Amino acid sequence: MTAKKICMLGSFSVGKTSLVERYVRSIFSDQYLSTVGVKISKKELTAKGQNVSLVLWDMEGKDDYSNINLSYLRGAMGLFLVADGLRRETLDEAYTLQTVVATLVGDIPRILLINKFDLAEQWEVTNDDIARLEGQRFTIMKTSAKTGYGVDEAFLALAEAML
């Protein structure tokens, strides 16, 4: 079995922990609990005919990643950059974050998740915002940790990109 380390990065309260909980345990909680440091979870899946163990590093949310803990990123083979569709500034922060992280870990597979799709009618993030980033070679997926929309597909897509 192949093990792949994935780091979950993004501003506070974008839903990183909720996405991991939905994927790993099929649960969702409305209670917000801030992650301190890093929380590590595992899940096995089959991608491209191979058994893969995903080691998910759910990193604490910050608005300033200029002093990111490099030891958390060491060995990462994939990244999820998570933004909150209800807060446009988190999309800009995710874009800036991917630039910072790329200088630290190189060009590894990454997917930008725009979370809270269950509230899409209230989003500040627009289709134009998404199109602009897609034009910059970003893979973007819409997810909802609450309903599970797009969550399994996102983790499978990143697993396949890492193989």
Image (cartoon, grey):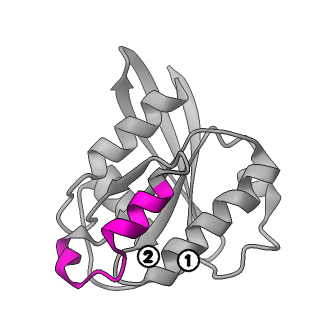
Q: Do the residues labelled 1 and 2 touch (CB within 8 Å)?
A: yes
Residue type for callout 2: Val
Q: Position of residue 126 (x, y in %)?
A: 33, 73
**Does residue 17 appear in this view?**
no
SS for tag 1? loop
The answer to whether 55 appears left or right of 83 in the picture is right
Residue type for callout 1: Ser
Q: Main secondary structure of the magenta part?
A: helix
> Which residue: 18% across, 72% down?
118
The answer to whether 29 appears left or right of 109 in the picture is left
Instruction: State the residue in front, 139 or 16.
Output: 139
Up the image or down, 65 lies above or below 57; here it is: below
Q: Decide: few, some or many residues near mark 1? Use Cα within 10 Å; few <14, some 14-19, many ≥20.
A: many
Which residues lie in the magenta part? 118-133
Q: Which mark is residue 14?
A: 2
Q: Residue 11 carries which label?
A: 1
> Which residue: 21% across, 58% down?
148
Instruction: State the residue in front, 138 or 24.
Output: 138
Residue 14 lies within the magenta run: no
Q: Decide: few, some or many residues near mark 2? Use Cα within 10 Å; few <14, some 14-19, many ≥20.
A: many
Q: Position of residue 104 (x, y in %)?
A: 81, 51
Instruction: State the residue in front, 106 or 124.
Output: 124
**Does residue 117 appear in this view?**
yes
Up the image or down, 96 lies above or below 2; here it is: below
